[in-house]
């Protein structure tokens, strides 16, 4: 991985070029004023500021973790030096204007008006601090040579500043394009990795809610297991390619239903599916249990529809699933090593859910009493036999899920009779019993008259 200090902002090179140009122009102005004065301090300062300082500033910014902010601070130092130069030229009109105009544009491009206001302050400080040592000689007339140098420099600076702005915008546009490409690559990779994780787990990791480290906690969850009855005999009667296609279709349809109800898909184990509700997102123990049983009902209905499709395609032995559901405290979190982790659940309650599934008959949903207590208000269940599970010292009462109360009530109001040559149906939710009886009497009267 690249060291962040090496990943400097690409327009720093542009700022370095601007600094070299500005300082060189400043050196020309200073040379036009002091060309006949053997002031070694001034000449040393000018030479350092033109030849050495731009490279030092670029190196400091490049190696900074926050290169753009560092560059802005260095520009404030530049303006301090310009304040020193303005004092040295005794605030002469044209050279002072050239120093001010030459620096303002670059500062505004780098940091906006806020940085400009700070820069003006640093320039004033540079002027005043030098004045304390050098004195304050105000508005001395510049020589014709200095004026001749200063005016073209300001014009040239405007041209260079325009180019500098264009180059900066071009560099930023290139950065944005590069970031867009990298973002698309990361999103593509993340999308592929998401296929190996439950969406809830994937979302909690990428949102920062969960850290990728070995960590577990105790939670009350509702656990679901399902498998395909007599799957071994089905594998013996089908080719591998056809079986793979059938199984993947089955998993795909069941996964859609699980995600629709908010279940966390733990894993596929051969022909079995393990799902849990209550982590990483939970609607509360009761709602999680209801969602899980509703999911199981939808799966059972979808399997009924899929069996018809499979029969139409010539699959003689259609798939029949059995399901088990339990609610209880489990240990949930990341298990494994630092290099390879699995987000899953463990505990006796998980084993109980698995045992309920293996005890269920074909197309049957078997639940524990703990789950039954949460769903009995909305879902009809039939009490079944007790089972004994290793690790649980008491017998576990089981219940078979029938359907929603409202669906069973509606079914009680459906009168349907189909025989060869005879068909009758009546929906007592839409017609009264008296009206249905009148219609039947009319039919009977016609039959007697035949």
Image (spheres, helix red, strand yellow):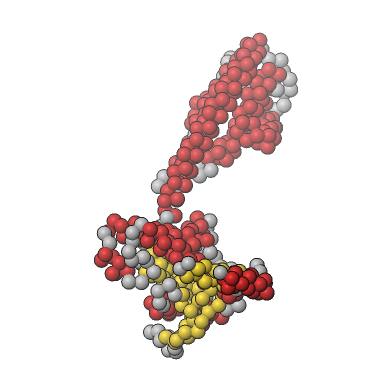
Quadrant (top left/top right/bottom left/bottom right) for the C terminus? bottom right
> Residue at 62% of width from left, 35% of height from top?
111
Where is residue 278 shown, x and y percent of the image? 53, 69
* 324 lies left or right of 435: left
* Quadrant of the rendered image containing residue 116: top right
Q: Is residue 132 visible?
A: no
Q: Is residue 324 above or below residue 49?
A: below
* Quadrant of the rendered image containing residue 172: top right
* 267 lies left or right of 208: left
Front one among 355 and 102: 355
Q: How many marks?
A: 0
* Quadrant of the rendered image containing residue 359: bottom left
Q: Residue furthest front?
A: 449
Q: Is residue 89 above or below residue 329?
A: above
> Residue at 63% of width from left, 11% of height from top?
148
Where is residue 401 shown, x and y percent of the image? 50, 76
> Residue at 51% of width from left, 82% of height from top?
382
Q: Is residue 213 above or below residue 106?
A: below
Q: Is residue 36 visible?
A: yes
Q: Residue furthest bottom?
A: 394
Where is residue 296 shown, x and y percent of the image? 48, 69
> Residue at 42% of width from left, 55% of height from top?
195
* 436 lies left or right of 390: right
* 111 lies left or right of 173: right
């Amino acid at each position: 991985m690249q060291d962040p200090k090496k990943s400097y902002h690409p327009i720093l090179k542009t700022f370095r070029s601007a600094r070299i140009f500005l300082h060189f122009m400043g050196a020309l102005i200073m040379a036009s004023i002091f060309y006949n004065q053997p002031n070694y301090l001034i000449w040393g300062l000018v030479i350092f500021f033109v030849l050495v300082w731009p490279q030092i500033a670029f190196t400091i910014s490049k190696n900074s973790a926050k290169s753009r902010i560092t560059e802005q601070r260095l520009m404030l130092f530049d303006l301090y030096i310009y304040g020193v130069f303005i004092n040295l030229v005794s605030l002469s009109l044209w050279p002072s204007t050239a120093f001010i105009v030459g620096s303002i544009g670059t500062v505004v491009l780098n940091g906006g008006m806020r940085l400009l206001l700070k820069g003006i302050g640093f320039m004033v400080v540079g002027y005043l601090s030098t004045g304390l040592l050098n004195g304050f000689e105000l508005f001395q007339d510049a020589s014709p040579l200095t004026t001749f140098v200063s005016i073209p420099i300001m014009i040239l600076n405007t041209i260079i500043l325009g180019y500098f702005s264009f180059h900066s915008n071009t560099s930023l546009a290139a950065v944005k394009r590069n970031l867009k490409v990298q973002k698309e690559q990361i999103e593509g990779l993340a999308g592929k990795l998401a296929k190996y994780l439950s969406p809830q787990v994937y979302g909690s990791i990428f949102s920062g809610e969960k850290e990728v480290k070995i960590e577990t906690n105790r939670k009350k969850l509702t656990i679901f297991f399902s498998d395909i009855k007599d799957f071994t005999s089905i594998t013996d009667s089908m080719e591998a390619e056809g079986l793979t296609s059938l199984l993947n279709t089955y998993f795909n349809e069941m996964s859609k239903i699980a995600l629709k109800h908010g279940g966390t898909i733990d894993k596929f184990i051969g022909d079995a599916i393990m799902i849990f509700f209550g982590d990483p997102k939970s609607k509360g123990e009761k709602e999680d249990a209801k969602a899980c049983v509703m999911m199981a009902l939808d799966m059972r209905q979808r399997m009924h529809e899929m069996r018809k499709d499979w029969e139409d395609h010539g699959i003689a032995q259609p798939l029949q699933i059995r399901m088990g559901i339990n609610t209880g405290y489990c240990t949930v979190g990341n298990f494994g090593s630092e290099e390879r982790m699995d987000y899953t659940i463990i505990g006796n309650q998980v084993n109980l859910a698995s045992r309920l599934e293996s005890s269920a008959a074909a197309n049957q949903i078997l639940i524990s009493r703990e789950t039954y207590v949460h769903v009995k208000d909305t879902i009809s269940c039939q009490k079944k036999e007790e089972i004994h599970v290793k690790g649980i010292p008491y017998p576990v009462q089981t219940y078979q899920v029938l359907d929603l109360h409202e669906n069973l009530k509606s079914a009680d109001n459906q009168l349907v009779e189909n025989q060869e040559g005879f068909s009758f149906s009546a929906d007592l939710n839409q017609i009264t019993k008296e009206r249905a009886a009148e219609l039947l009497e009319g039919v009977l009267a016609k039959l007697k008259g035949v």
